[in-house]
Image: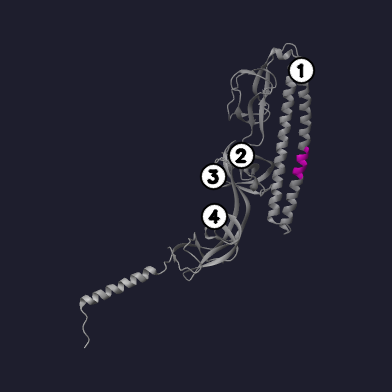
Amino acid sequence: MMKRLQPRRIALIAAGVVLLLLVAYGFMPTRPNVDTTSVIRGPMDVLIEEEGRTRVIDRFVVAAPISGVVRRIELEVGDAVEEGSAIVTIEPMRVEALNPQRRAEAEARVAAAKSALQSAEEVVRAAGADADLARSELERMQGLFDGDAATQRDVAYAAAQSRRAAAQKSSAEFSVEVARHNLDAAQTALRFAGAAGGGVPVVIKAPVSGRVLAVHQESEGVVSPGIPLLEVGDPERLEVAVDVLSQDATRLAAGMAVRFARWGGNGEDLRGVVRTVEPVGFTKVSALGVEEQRVWTVVDFVSDPATWSRLGDGYRVVAQFVAWEANDVLQLPSSALFRRGDGWATFVVEGGRAVERAVTVGQRSGLTVQIEAGVNEGDEVIVHPTSEVEDGTRIRVRS
């Protein structure tokens, strides 16, 4: 007969077995916890985002045509003015009227103003011809698009060119008005230069209809020729000036679509189109004290003016230039990628294990990357993989 084990011995054996199991469990490899996401298909765009500010397209600075005493300007910023209405009155100084040298200078200014007016009128005629050509080209593209001979992009580009040509024509017409006003101012100065017995007040009229944008000389005082008195413009004709990094400016072109976000409206983004990318850069010191080469880019609004009617001159907007976009793109978060040699790779979850896959990436947009090859739609990949995760590692997916 076998000797019966005592309860004390049984307890010691059980404790030993449990201890051995605990030691074995401690030496077992742990399964790291990971977060995953799925590879999806959907729309994707690549944006270049910079801050910009609005500005009035046609802005006119009203300056003193002669030396004299300017009367107090009663207009305030925001007041409406009509073209031809009196806005400033200057009482010429008698010494001005007795100076022959001033008369010669005034005659030269009149001649220069006449030449400037003729030049501006020629520019208007050229801009009108360009606008007519752009409009006919748009009509031709629309006809080709209806006949499946042109793409929607061709039509959009032709429409942008038509809008750009129309804006240039409008700006040229404004330049004619400005040149005509300068001629009137020069002729006014000539009437008082070298004439006996000055002292007749000179009334300066508004060159265009719009609103007062700035008042530089509010109180009565002595002014010299060329001293700015106030600024007039139409705040309903706005453009956006955006300074972008020079390396980003090389990716921009006239006609490129632009979105304006976080501008303070009802949450809806505004739409615009690039009019021009200036060919000259400038140096700007960033908030971190780093010198950067920047380039001014001018953007026109294409959204309904009623949607941005609350914007004014000098308002801040965030411009998002659409450098690339597509509607059906295989994509995953950039946090799921890591470097592997000269290429990129990701971990795909298969059977509770992390399987390394080499992938070919395309466009990159902030937190999202286009995948051209390596994974399929619906594959589950690991985001933010740690050093514990290697090819073939058993993992535990967080819920």
Residue tagged 3:
262
Residue at (37, 68) in percent of width and height: 26
**Which amino acid type is marked by label 1?**
Arg
Q: Is the Cβ of the residue at disc 4 closer than 8 Å to that at disc 1?
A: no
Q: How far apart are labels 4 and 1 at the CA level?
A: 68 Å
Name the N-terminal-most of marks 3 and 4: 3
Residue tagged 2:
284
Q: Could you tell me residue 111's position as x and y percent?
A: 79, 25
Name the N-terminal-most of marks 3 and 1: 1
Residue tagged 4:
367
Identify the element where label 4 is drawn.
loop
Q: Quadrant of residue 297?
A: top right
Identify the element where label 3 is drawn.
loop
Q: Is the Cβ of the residue at disc 3 closer than 8 Å to that at disc 1?
A: no
Name the N-terminal-most of marks 4 and 2: 2
Image vertical order of residue 236 relative to residue 325, above or below: above
Q: Quadrant of residue 2?
A: bottom left
Q: Is the Cβ of the residue at disc 3 closer than 8 Å to that at disc 4?
A: no
Residue nearest the observer in this picture, 389 or 106: 389
Instruction: Look at the magenta stretch and give its main secondary structure.
Output: helix
Q: Quadrant of the C terminus?
A: bottom left
**Which amino acid type is marked by label 2?**
Lys
Mark seen at residue 103: 1
Q: How far apart are labels 3 and 1 at the CA level?
A: 54 Å
